[in-house]
Image: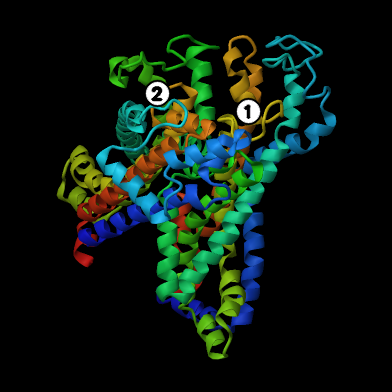
Amino acid sequence: MVRRRLAVGVLTLFLVSVVVFLATEVLPGNAAYAILGRTATPARLHALEASLHLNRGIFDQYWVWISGLFTGRLGNSLVNGLPVWSYVEPRIVNSAVLVFVAGAAGAILGVALGAVAALRKDSWFDHITSVVVLAVTSLPEFVVAIGLIILLSTVVWHILPAVSLLAPGTYAWSQPELLVLPAATLVIVIVPYILRMMRAAMVEALESDYVEMARLKGVPEWRIVLMHALPNAIAPTIQVIGLNFLYLAGGIVIVEYVFNFPGIGQGLVFAVNDRDVPVVQFIVLVLAAFYVVVNIVTDVIALLATPRRRIAR
Amino acid sequence: MAVNAPAASPAARTPPQNVKRIRRHQWASLLWVAIRTPRGAIGLGLASFVVLVAVIGPFVAPQSPYALVTLAFGKPNGQFLLGGDFLGRDVLSRVLNGGWLLLIMAACATALGIVGGAAAGVSAAYLRGRSDGIIMRTVDVILAFPQLVFALLLLSLLGPRLWLITIAVGVSHAPQVARVIRSATLDITERDFVKAAELQGMRPAKVMAKEILPNLVSPLMVEAGLRLTYSIVIISGLAFLGFGQEPPAANWGLMINENRIGLSLNPWSVIVPAALIALLTIGTNTFTDAFARVTIGVDRRPEEAALIDDLGGEVSE
């Protein structure tokens, strides 16, 4: 089961790389023309086609590109001529830090709040969270980000920096205060989903036979919650936590842009603006690969965490 | 259980036409029930308010959205109720002009995603075999791209064209819809009325259109509500990133980005467009949630809930 899932994942990754590659090839007007636009002269077009390997056969081109991924030769940015890898690498690190911090904080907060909401089912806390959750899940990230900026760094209070400009050559962990607002935005966006799932799973667990049994045996309530209900409720929640890491792969794009946080999301926006195809190709592939890998990991963990499913298949 | 069983079984044996007629009325009455729940009423109210602002706005705007009439980031006053934007244009007039295109694009993208996704999902589940494999593999590949990233990839190649944004968002919705509809269809294909239609020699395309699709109206409506919310989120997000209407166009997403440098001077130039987008998405999502609760009756996320065959309740018990 696990092995089959991995095989499907590798196949998906391959197809994704083909799609990313073909997108630059099949769409009307080749990449060279798209980049040069009106300034295209036959000579410039020809030179650029050669540098993008567009004058070779399609399989050759794919091979050059995909083998470059493994050898680190990704070609150069069309805008500044720098190697793609040296431009993207620090951004990947920064984004990874942001995703990890936001994902972990969101998971902990979501599980805790969801468990409390379930324990206090139908209390005012439960009702308020359910309304807030519904409102927040529908908000675009940039609206949440702008809201935080208004609240914490411009109009109301001036506590935190509104932009996360890192000194060149430094990484995100060197100035943790710059991580706060981008991470907080992402946490606000993902917590509601985790909370909602955790609450539902916890309510179900608390009403289950084994909890009833434990109560009848006279097990203390804190023990029932922590040792019996919580582990069983977390198993289905893991999948939703995984899904939220998936969401973060897309969510960082806007959030990094809002806060000028130098990660791959912001890099993607800049590259799309400049039609910097090699950079766009690579970043999109990184994000898609992250998506596929997290998907597999989530599935496998969910499979292992649920004894019923592990045995049934 | 023993009491319920006899009551349920005659319903299961009613002829297909009869069941279909009941169902056709069912989604309409469910919609009505949803509107009368507190959540449904609030959601519909919020969304309608924003739609009204966007649609009537261009006709009642006091100024031209492009005219430089006041100070850059000028504070609100009697003449310019929401102050000036970064160039000194009237924020109120720009807000009133800046929403209608978002609504049209979001509606088109949603329609595209629902039609494409439903066609793919129903075909995959009904035709099974190789078609199922090919469709679901394609779905997996598209799903590997975060929706915004998928749109950005296309835009980087063809440039920020409005039709392309709409199509890109619609296409990125389709796989999600296809997944939900596929699993809903899988249960329906097992029902007697589908078998009966097949035995009468109905062609597969007709079975899907006439027998299966009418039973998917409720899950499709839940999906449409969800996808509409996401369409608004993604399209306004793209506009915010600068991939949408070009300046000097009045566009809520673009306005937020243009004016955020002057947040401390005239916050209204950012707060009002941001609040309208927020109210719109909260409205559509809340109404969808109310409708999903009414149709499915379970407190879960609509995506998961739609996976459950909500229409099967009366027959499967």
Residue type, numbered disc 1: Leu
Which mark is in front, 1 or 2? 2
Look at the numbered disc 2 and give the secondary structure of its residue: loop
In the rendered view, would you say B172 is above or below B50?
below
Residue B195: percent from left, percent from top: 50, 84
Marks 1 and 2, how far apart in space? 21 Å
Residue at numbered disc 1:
B254
In the rendered structure, the answer to whether residue B123 lies left or right of residue B90 reads left
In the rendered structure, the answer to whether residue A168 lies left or right of residue B12 reads left
In the rendered view, would you say A306 is above or below B169?
below
Rendered residue at 65%/18% (across/down): B268
Q: Mark 2 lies on which chain?
A: A
Residue A89: percent from left, percent from top: 31, 29
Looking at the image, do the residues carrying marks 1 and 2 touch, with CB atoms under 8 Å apart? Answer: no
In the foreground, B293 or A147 = A147
Quarter of the image where the C terminus of chain A is located:
bottom left
Residue at numbered disc 2:
A262
In the foreground, B313 or A54 = A54
Residue A257: percent from left, percent from top: 48, 26
In this view of the protein, can residue A32 be seen by the observer?
Answer: yes
